Image (cartoon, rainbow, N blue to C red):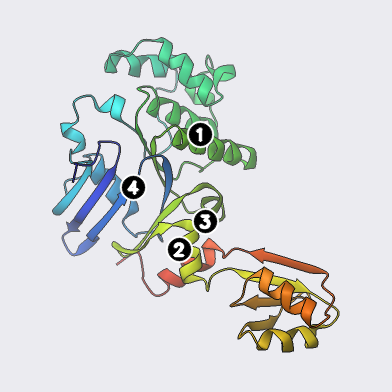
Amino acid sequence: MSAPGTDEIVVDHLTKQYKKLRAVDDLSFKVRSGRVTGFLGPNGAGKTTTLRMLLGLVTPTAGTATFGSQKYIDLPDPVREVGAVLEASSAHRGRTGRNHLRMICRAAGLPDSRADEALEMVGLTPAANRKFKGYSLGMRQRLGIAAAMLGDPKVLILDEPANGLDPEGIRWMRDLLKALASQGRTVLVSSHLLGEMQLLADDVVIVAAGKLIRQGPVDEVLGDLSGGVQVRVRTPQAAELTAALAELDATVTPGADGSLVVHGVEAAAIGHAAFTARVELHELSTERGDLEQVFLQLTAGKAGIR
C-alpha cells in the first residue's frame, strides 16, 4: 500500500493530557482530499487542541497528527502545503490589509502579487488600503483566509471561520470552501453552525470529551443515526393510506401540520400503495435527516468540559 500524500490529514491515536485534564483522548481519523470535512463537537470537546497539535503548536502526549506521514514541522515548504486560520486574523492596527499580506509574503519568500490575488479571492480588494483597525470581525476573518491562501496550499484548516460573518458572508464562505475542495484540496473546518455544516460538508468527524464519536460522509451519518430518510405525505384519506402502508411494515406518524410522516419505505413504494388503494395524494416528498438532531443524539451526556 502506498503512503498517504501530504494532502491527506491523518490523526492517529492522538492524546493530550494537561495535568488532570485529558483534552484529547486516543483520537484517530483521516481527512480526504477533494472534500470538505466538518470537525464537530461541543465546547471543550478538544477540537481546537487537536488542530493546534496538527499544526505543531501543541506537543501531543501520545500519538501523531500528520499530513500524510509528515508532521507539520517536517514539511519542506509548509506555507505552500498547509494554510490555517485558528482565530480571526490579527495584524498591526495601523497597517493596511494589503501591506499585512505583503509582509507575510516577504517572510515566506512569496511574490507581492500573491497579496492582491488573495485579497481578490476573499472579496477584500475594495478594502485593501483600509487600515486593519477599521476592519469588522467578518473582514478580519476574510483577511485571515487570504493569509492562509497566500502559498496556494493543498490543505486548508479553519477553526470557526464563520464567526462574525453575516448571512451573505456565510454563503460566500460556503461557496469558496466548496470551490477549493473541488480543485482537489483538503479542507477541514471546525464549526458550531450545524445547519451550515450540513450544507457545506461532504464528511463529518464528531468528537466529544476528547474522543471520536462518529465519522463518515454526511449522508451516511444522517442515514445511520437519524433513522434514515423520511417521507412526508399529505392526503385527505389518511386512514386508508395508513392501512395500506401497514401492509408494507412502514411506520406512520401524524405530523404537526396535518401531514403523515412515513419511515421504513421509499416514496415510490408509498405512491404505488396509494395508487393501488385508490388514495388521493396531495404531497409526497422525501426529507433528509437533520445534522443538529444527530449531533445532539450522539453527544448527549458527553460533557465537553471535564
Q: Are marks 1 and 2 in contact (CB under 8 Å)?
A: no
Q: Are marks 3 and 4 in contact (CB under 8 Å)?
A: no
Name which residue type carries label 4: Val
Q: Position of residue 211 (x, y in %)?
A: 29, 64
Q: Is residue 141 above or below residue 121?
A: below
- Could you tell me how far apart the alpha carbons at marks 2 and 3 are, in whole angstroms? 13 Å
Q: Is residue 50 above or below residue 122?
A: below
- SS for tag 1? helix
Residue lying at the far top of the rendered structure: 112
Q: For residue 194, which numbered disc appears in the image?
A: 3
- SS for tag 3? helix
Sequence-earlier tag: 3 or 4: 4
* Residue under the point 30% across and 46% down: 51
- Could you tell me how far apart the alpha carbons at marks 2 and 4 are, in whole angstroms? 16 Å
- Could you tell me how far apart the alpha carbons at marks 3 and 4 are, in whole angstroms? 19 Å
Q: Position of residue 284 (x, y in %)?
A: 74, 68
Residue placed under numbered mark 4 in the picture: 31
Give the quadrant of residue 266: bottom right
Residue placed under numbered mark 1 in the picture: 179
* Residue under the point 38% across and 24% down: 152
- Could you tell me how far apart the alpha carbons at marks 1 and 2 are, in whole angstroms? 23 Å
Name which residue type carries label 3: Leu
Q: Nearer the viewer, residue 243 or 155?
A: 243
Sequence-earlier tag: 4 or 1: 4
Q: Nearer the viewer, residue 210 or 261?
A: 261
* Residue under the point 44% across and 23% down: 93
Sequence-earlier tag: 1 or 2: 1
The nearer-to-camera label among 3 and 4 is 4
Residue placed under numbered mark 2 in the picture: 221
Name which residue type carries label 1: Ala
